[in-house]
Amino acid sequence: MRFPKISRSLRQLSTHVLAIALGVVLAVSTLQVLPSQAEPAPTITVDTSNLIAQRQSPASAAIGSSSFVTAAVNRVGSAVVRIDTERTITRRVDPFMEDPFFRRFFGDGFSQQMPPSEQLRGLGSGFIIDKSGLVMTNAHVVDKADKVTVRLKDGRTFEGKVQGIDEVTDLAVVKINAGNDLPVAPLGSSSNVQVGDWAIAVGNPLGFDNTVTLGIVSTLKRSSAQVGISDKRLDFIQTDAAINPGNSGGPLLNGQGEVIGINTAIRPDAMGIGFAIPIDKAKAIATQLQRDGKVAHPYLGVQMLTLTPDLAKQNNTDPNSPIQIPEINGVFVMRVVPNSPAASAGIRRGDVILQIDGKAITSAEQLQNVVEDSRLGQVLQVKVQRGNKTEQLSVRTAELQNAS
């Protein structure tokens, strides 16, 4: 009886031993499968200098430790000036206020509360383009000013004399008498400017003298019509460099410190957008203003709109449209100015200008540039679409008398 019990105990013991042995084997195999728990972690070397470089912005990387902006501003800064203007507005006395009946009811003091004149003050910027004291600025900065004061960066002030104003291009030249050894801003070439180039605006925005802002050239040849200044004839450089009131007339620089434009055309609704007159245009205008005091601009005398087939189709499908327009590319004549060259040549409202001197015209800006580049008194051969017919008209340009 005792032998079977012993054999059963031995079998149970061997079973326990086998289970323990299997557990040990499994534990060892698990450690081999997970070497990260059995082996020391590999050493990782971190290059902190590379991490810092990666956190730098592209602008910081481009500028580097020695700022090209500083070099550019130092090159031109002393030639940038502040322009203060004064203008007196005289009010015409209303005869009603001088009437004894009016005075009896309102008293003599009522009319005396309104001064007969008021002095307006303006602020702008400019830059010296010649050692003799020639300063370039915007026309709207000095237009109709009774007094112009030019302040140099070193604090010296001089009375400025306006030598010429061109409202059409918003450019003006002012002369100061300060000797013949003034700092001169180096003039670059706007024809070499590309979208994405650095743009540095220098001036006196909001009365804060010697202010510098940095951006890039956003686009080129932005027409004055697109900007919303229909009475100008310009293709602007657009930039995101901050331009505020008081910057007008100051220089826009490239990365080498050369003037590529003149800051102007500030739109009140613009957010981070500014405009500058290309310096190549300004050079030509400045020469004429210095010589003649004005610039003669040829004109035709039409108000126009760029026409496309889609635009014409939208008009023609409108049951309330007063006229049907040819569904073609060209320039639609919205109005003809009375007694203008266009009126004398027989151009009518509703005509579509197709060609000038055999060259296809597809936009109002293109037409404006062709006329601007013509000579005063030049006869232009203008092909127009009038209804279902085409007409060939000869238009002799004349001088534009008033920009407005």
Image (cartoon, rainbow, N blue to C red):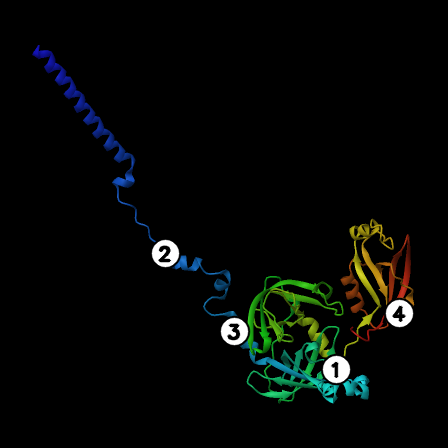
The CA distance from mark 3 to mark 4 is: 54 Å
CB-based contact (under 8 Å), mark 4 and mark 1: no
At label 4, counting other C-alpha atoms closer than 10 Å, the crowd grade (few under 14, some 14-19, many 20 or more) is few
In percent of the image, x 61 and y 72: which residue is there? 244
The CA distance from mark 4 to mark 1 is: 32 Å
Mark 3 sits on what residue?
71
Can the viewer see residue 58? Answer: yes
For label 4, the SS is: loop
For label 3, the SS is: helix
Q: Is residue 367 left or right of residue 218?
A: right
In percent of the image, x 26 and y 42: which residue is there? 39
Q: Quadrant of the C terminus?
A: bottom right
Which amino acid, by three-letter code, is at mark 1?
Arg
Q: Position of residue 278 (x, y in %)?
A: 67, 70
CB-based contact (under 8 Å), mark 4 and mark 2: no
In percent of the image, x 79 and y 63: which residue is there? 367
Mark 4 or mark 2: name the one nearer the start of the chain. Answer: 2
Mark 1 sits on what residue?
291
Mark 4 or mark 1: name the one nearer the start of the chain. Answer: 1
Q: Position of residue 17 (x, y in %)?
A: 16, 24
Q: Is residue 107 left or right of residue 50?
A: right
**Quadrant in the picture for residue 209:** bottom right
Mark 2 sits on what residue?
47
The CA distance from mark 4 to mark 2 is: 76 Å
For label 1, the SS is: helix
Mark 4 sits on what residue?
338
The CA distance from mark 3 to mark 2 is: 32 Å
